[in-house]
Image: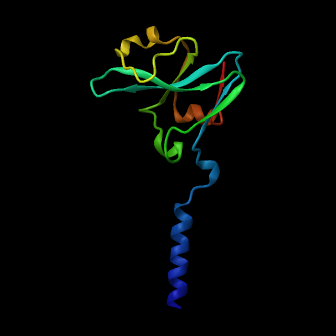
Amino acid sequence: MRHILITIICLMLISSTCKKEEDCHAYVNFVNQSEKDVYFALRASDYIGNCRLDGNKVMKNDTFDFRPYNSCIEDNLNSNTPLDIYIIDSDKYNSPGAFYDCDSIAIKNRILKHYTLTLEDLKQSDFKILYP
């Protein structure tokens, strides 16, 4: 009897902490519908406050699955810290690994689109970004 009670308690604990798959999104799907290769980039900073954009090249008419966190987006993204995503022209993208003054992002890169996305924005778009 004690064994059955312990099993029931364990099952209740496991089932109460599990999320439904539809409540947990690990990826944002970026769709490049343009006729040009672009970079899907995030802003990175070094220890002295300089910046650069780090990104992945997404070929024309292709997709890229972006994983911003190691767990569910819903558990990590909040209204105080939205996702800042930059779409950069592949012909003018900052040198990889080089940091520069943060005010120079638009000088070092040709920004085609800048998204500032909250969790609500991502939910409304079904965790998909269509460019352009």
Question: Is 36 positioned to the left or the right of 98 in the image?
Answer: right
| Front residue of 11 and 45 | 45
The number of numbered badges drawn on the structure is 0
Residue 112 higher or lower than 82, as above or below: above
* Along the line of sight, the residue nearer the viewer: 21 or 51: 51
Residue at left 54%, top 80%? 7
Q: Is residue 68 left or right of residue 62?
A: left
Furthest residue toward top? 107
Instruction: Place residue 4 in its image quadrant.
Output: bottom right
Q: Quadrant of the C terminus?
A: top right
On the image, the x and y values in percent for residue 105 come to 43, 14
Residue at point 55%, 73% (across, down)? 11
Seen as rendered, the residue at the extreme bottom is 1
Q: Position of residue 83 (x, y in %)?
A: 49, 30
Q: Position of residue 127 (x, y in %)?
A: 62, 36
Q: How is the image coloured?
A: rainbow
Residue occupying image coordinates x 51% and y 48%: 71
Residue 2 x, y percent position in the rendering: 50, 89
Question: Which sits in the foreground, 43 or 96?
Answer: 96
Residue at 37 percent across and 21 percent down: it is 51
Q: Is 115 situated left or right of 32 in this image?
A: left
